[in-house]
Image (cartoon, rainbow, N blue to C red):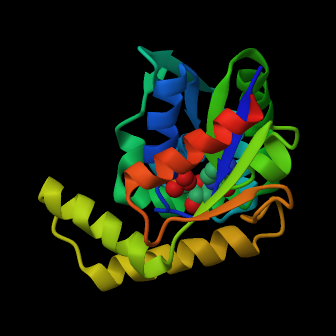
Amino acid sequence: MINIAIDGPAGAGKSTIARRTAANLGYIYVDTGALYRAVGVSVLRRGLDTTDAKAVAQVLNEIKIELKFVDGVQHVFLNGEDVSTDIRLPEASMAASNVSAIPAVRAFLFDLQKSIAANSNCIMDGRDIGTVVLPDAQLKVFLTASAEVRAKRRYDELVVKGTPVEFNELLEEIKLRDHNDSTRAIAPLKKADDAVLVDSSDMTIDEVCETLEKLVREIK
Ligand code: DC
């Protein structure tokens, strides 16, 4: 199986680029952030603190998380319920970041990610795919962009959707998540030694896709 790992901070454009390239290649696109978001949502729904490792570990005994691909589109299920919409609620982002720092959560989601990659040609995006989940991926990309550019992209997306937001609030949240994700003790966000660094700050989506497709052609 061909496995491509794309890691990078929130808002770098990983999902847009990975989804489009996967569709062009006929691979599945696996968004691993959705798994952490589903755990975060289940903890929030129970009214528990997403940083409380003991409480979160207890929740893991009560939940089953599955990914299903419908016409190539990933859906995430929490105890049989499709939570693909709820995991995109604003509060799910920090909840996911918080639970993702808990070792039991990472262990809980590891096998699911490995088994998908073992059975399909895929592009998998996240924070630790090249470093921990798929260290033998045929191609690893670390996609980044400045915090300001990432916040501006989120801001523009939300404005188009008609959701009122403060740019500075988005920027602060992005910086806080970067800090959380890259300083945690377990599987922190970092570039794998053998990953190709792509800084998309001054690139269009088309340019980033072309760069990725060129890298993919080189592995074959
Ligand atoms: O990619 P995303 O923004 O949907 O991810 C949400 C959070 O999940 C992110 O802030 C950190 C965590 N995450 C992780 O720790 N490891 C991954 N492979 C993917 C996401």
Identify which residue is drawn at 77% across, 55% down. 195
Against 189, residue 129 (above or below) is above
Q: Position of residue 82 (x, y in %)?
A: 42, 25
Against 192, residue 215 (above or below) is above
Against 82, residue 189 (above or below) is below
For the view shown, which residue lies furthest in the left direction? 162
Q: Quadrant of the C terminus?
A: top right
Give whichever of 31, 4 is nearer the camera: 4
Q: Position of residue 58 (x, y in %)?
A: 72, 45
Q: Position of residue 112 (x, y in %)?
A: 73, 28
Identify which residue is drawn at 42% across, 33% down. 83
Q: Quadrant of residue 181?
A: bottom right
Against 138, residue 103 (above or below) is below
Q: Quadrant of residue 212?
A: top right
Give whichever of 100, 170 is nearer the camera: 170
Q: Position of residue 46 (x, y in %)?
A: 50, 47
* Residue 32 visible at all: no
* Residue 107 visible at all: yes
Please indicate whether residue 43 sits to the left or right of residue 182 in the image: left
Identify which residue is drawn at 69% across, 18% down. 120
Give whichever of 13, 37 is nearer the camera: 13
Number of callouts: 0
Identify which residue is drawn at 63% across, 78% down. 179
Give whichever of 126, 97 is nearer the camera: 126
Q: Quadrant of the N terminus?
A: top right
Q: Locate ligand 1 by image quadrant.
A: bottom right
